[in-house]
Amino acid sequence: MPKKELDTFSVSYLSILDEDGNVDKDLEPKLKKPELIELYRQMVWARRTDERMLKLQRQGRIGTFGPSTGQEAAQCAVAFAMKKQDWFAGAFREHGVRLLRGETLTRQLLYYNGQEEGNINEGAANPRNLPISVIVGAQPLHAVGLAYAMRLQGETETCAVTFMGDGATSEGDFHEAMNFAAVWNLPVLFVVQNNQWAISVPRSKQTKSATIAQKAIAYGMPGIQVDGNDALAVYAAASEALDRGRRGEGPTLIEAVTYRLMMHTTADDQYKYRTKEEEELWWRRDPLVRFRGYLEAKKIWSEKDQEALEEEYKAEIEKQVKAFEEMSGWKPDAPFDHVFGTKHERIEAQRREFLAETAKEAARG
Amino acid sequence: MAKLNMVQAINLALDEMMAEDPSVIVLGEDVGVDGGVFRVTEGLIEKYGEARVIDTPLAESAIIGTAIGMALAGLKPVGEMQFCGFSYIMIPQLEGHGSRYRSRTHGQFHVPLVMRVPYGGGVRALEHHSESREASLGHFPGVKVVIPSGPRNARSLMRAAILDPDPVVYMEPKRSYRAFKEDVPETPETVEIGKAQVIQEGTDVTVIAWGAMMHTTKKAVEEIRQARGASIELIDLLTISPMDTETICASVRKTGRLAVVQEAPLSFGPASEIIATVNDHALMHLEAPVKRVCGYDVVTPYFGRENLYMPTVGRARRGIEEVLDF
């Protein structure tokens, strides 16, 4: 028997609005003017709040966090394509998704100031946002389970969207999640924000694959690489993937090629492993600048609009920071309330000891 | 009232819960068409279909990881780790997420899942198929660990585990799967997780065991009763974590003596925790040092030697008598 070719594969790259502001009219998503403006506003909101959080961290007013500056298109454009009923299982750098899906800056600040209360979905926060997942690559499996439950419960038009970074694709749980989602043919959208760096390890040391998108092929699902700093391309790819999911055609992998313009977290010094020149190259690809240029070319955004937006956000940020700083009165023994949903004497006895010891510690001064 | 072995009793509990509640589902390797390698899930796929009885790909982390997602959305998944020796792969998801969604969100999310873990030696199995690792699992806050010892409590504990709002690791002593039958009532029973059960009252010494060691210990206790008429209080621990301080200490206060029989390695195990608990609450009632009859701190030997390494009726008897004679 001769050796024969069983199959051939290819992998696509999608770019609609390029670095120089050129638009591919055939691929341009049919978004209405107010929608385009709303998406832009969300991206700017994510950037300005991220910048303010960095200042607050440097002033010691919040703890460590991972800035998302530079990744707004990869995040907000996916969230913009999602429906309210879709589940979101993110990692720890999806600030833009969280804000777009109703979480407040105040709540983010609370989380990054070491309070679990910052994870509680209150007010406009979507109850289908899972909290921040710090362990790299663990949450895609939860998205697969959520999608399974949705189908079993008859919500066949609900997708689960999970985010991770390029580093997470080396984890075993990434493989297991991709495999289970494909075998079960579930409406899961895997979004890999390939921001080039997993702390200090570059993309080139993470995988020998020419693209992360092509990993999808081995699992029997579509994968596409998109310009992750191009909000239009991200939106188009995410919309198509979510539509596929809702039609019962299974999961999709999107590799959004972007860049972490800041440090991994505020505890990191990125110049130990990369250059300012590299960062400058990517600043020139800033997704906000590119999208604003697109809106301005369409004559639906102006310098005046921008100034008004900056004023609006400055005031809103002040308001939300103030709200955060005025919060107090956290129940010290709350962790004992939430070990289990049932009461157990062994836990309660320790709570009593904790409260007695805490009072004694307070008395010591 | 039917006479069932433990495999049949767990199967009955799963069947009853799946019939009562459409959100209960079963997933794991070979749990569907094959009915599980121990036949614990036999017949369920025929009754409830492959959407609720899922033959998963071979990946333990994904079994628990997807079960966590299902539980977050309101299902009550019962997952199977085929053997305790393969279950360590579930720990990153169990400790990292299953045990934490409740505390992470102050109760907004919770994870009502059960992971079944057949464990323990005595079945002449290959390497990694005979371990007893309840101590490791019992160390994670937010996780409950339960172990039945016979058909009747296997059924009631499984019911309690599925009804529980939090992750429960349900460890099944393989050696007891088909070793004996018990009367199991027509009407489903439930037990309170976190409560040990005094199965025989006595005044001379308290003896605590769980899982497969209950059967061994019962025989030792009966030998001692016949030989010297000692009045022995026998406790079935049932829940490893959260451990039942009150039942243990109330008994020790009454008898003043204690022996613990544990299949797992000696160090850092539930037996040690039981002694520490007695130390905290009932030390001055002790009239003799507490005896631990345990496995040794060695890598579980292949089955050619395993009988030498597991606590036997003789070792349990000698241990209990040592306490009685002190």
Image (cartoon, coloured by chain):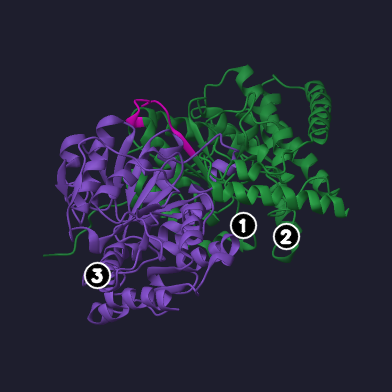
Above or below residue B151? Residue B301 is below
Cα–Cα gap, marks 2 and 3: 75 Å
Q: Residue at x 31, y 70 (%)?
A: B128
Residue A137 seen by the camera: no
Number of residues whose C-alpha sits closer than 10 Å to that of mark 2, classed few (under 14), some (14–19) or many (20 or more): some
Shown colour of chain A: green
What kind of residue is marked 3?
A: Gln
Number of residues whose C-alpha sits closer than 10 Å to that of mark 1, classed few (under 14), some (14–19) or many (20 or more): many
Q: Which chain is purple?
A: B
* Residue A270 circle label: 2
Q: Secondary structure at mark 1?
A: strand
Please tell me which residue lies in front, B103 or B2.
B2
What kind of residue is marked 2?
A: Gln
Prevailing secondary structure class for the magenta stretch in the rendered image: loop
Please tell me which residue lies in front, A91 or B277.
B277
Residue at the disc numbered 1: A197
Residue B235 seen by the camera: yes
Above or below residue B35? Residue A76 is above
Chain of the residue where label 1 is placed in the rendered structure: A
Chain of the residue where label 3 is placed in the rendered structure: B
Query: What segment carries the magenta color?
Result: A151-161
Q: Position of residue B287 (x, y in %)?
A: 51, 71
The residue lying furthest to the front in this view is: B229
Q: Position of residue B189 (x, y in %)?
A: 30, 39
Q: Residue at x 48, y 35 (%)?
A: A237
Discs 2, 1 touching: Cβ within 8 Å: yes
